[in-house]
Amino acid sequence: MVDTFLIENEVNIRLTAFFGVFALIALWEVLSPRRVLTMSKVVRWSNNLGLVFLNSIILRLLFPAAAVGVAVLAAERSWGLFNQYELPLMASAILSVILLDMVIYFQHVMVHAVPVLWRLHRVHHADPDYDVTTGARFHPLEIILSMLIKFVTIILLGPPVIAVIIFEVLLNATAMFNHGNIRLPLPVDRILRWVVVTPDMHRVHHSVEDDEANSNYGFNLPWWDRLFGTYRDQPRKGHEAMSIGIHHYHDVKQVIWISGLLTLPFVGRITEYAINRRNWNDKDHE
Ligand SMILES: [Zn+2]
Ligand SMILES: [Zn+2]
């Protein structure tokens, strides 16, 4: 059965897709870069990829069965919507991928809004450059939180196992694509961003400007930002001149070195970024 093959080879499928897409985007970045990087790639990449490697070990140790394992369990126990109300496989698979993506969107909005979660998510945003390695650079605690949210979603939704595998591979691939420092012809970008989050669309989200960073939360499907009002077309200064990162976070030891990335959630102030720290009465904003 296709399902059994996929489940048994799930880790290999995910790893092959990861390395394949990574190599492709990395090559594309060399051939046709969008911006000039501000930092040494060797130093940034070894730290970013070191964090990715650490995260994958932590995930394997904590959740060896991963999201797919939870989907198999939910199917066996008839947990969740689609295990209770049976739809044709194609319909439940497509709906599941779309709904899982919507949950990731709301999770992303949440980690920006809630101060303590923004502390974790800052690790992703503090990268002073924006390229394929930024796409996988998350604090281990945020990775664990994401996994737990995914588990709960799968238990409630009961998606077909194949949908979870497709979703994992797709999200991973699109995250690397849309963090790519790659140049797409503008007309192509314009068409593409109706179906997938493009590099130019997600780069806006990595701006140091608070209002731009509070836009374009989607990682995969671009519809949620348009539907829920968080869509922003382009950065004010344009893609070449815009600043990437977080205001006041420029110390290389803190925003590049892996030791700094791991401790980043526990240092510094939240400033005005998070939802309850904003200066609502500021006359300048009226
Ligand atoms: Zn973000
Ligand atoms: Zn990002």
Image: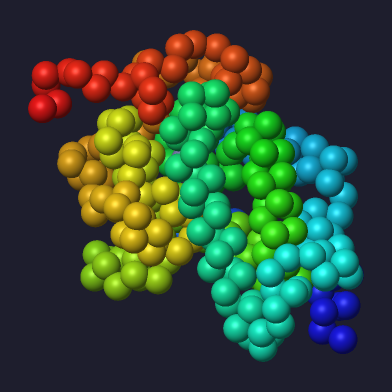
Q: Quadrant of residue 157?
A: bottom right
Residue projecting furthest to the top: 268
Closer to us: 69 or 131: 69
Q: Residue at x 87, y 67 (%)?
A: 77
**Between 171 and 83, which is closer to the camera in this rendering?**
83
At a point 63% along the width and 32% down the height, the residue shown is: 139
Nearest the viewer among 158 and 16 is 158
- Asked if 131 appears above or below 5 in the picture, the reply is above
Residue 230 coordinates in the image, percent (x, y): 32, 49
- Tell me the residue at 70%/78% (across/down): 85
Q: Judge from the rendering whether residue 37 lies leftward or rightward of residue 235; answer left or right.
A: right
Describe residue 236's horizontal placement relative to residue 25 as left or right.
Answer: left
Image quarter of the N terminus: bottom right
Residue 283 in view: yes
- Residue 54 image offset from top left, x and y in percent: 75, 35
Answer yes or no: is residue 12 visible: no
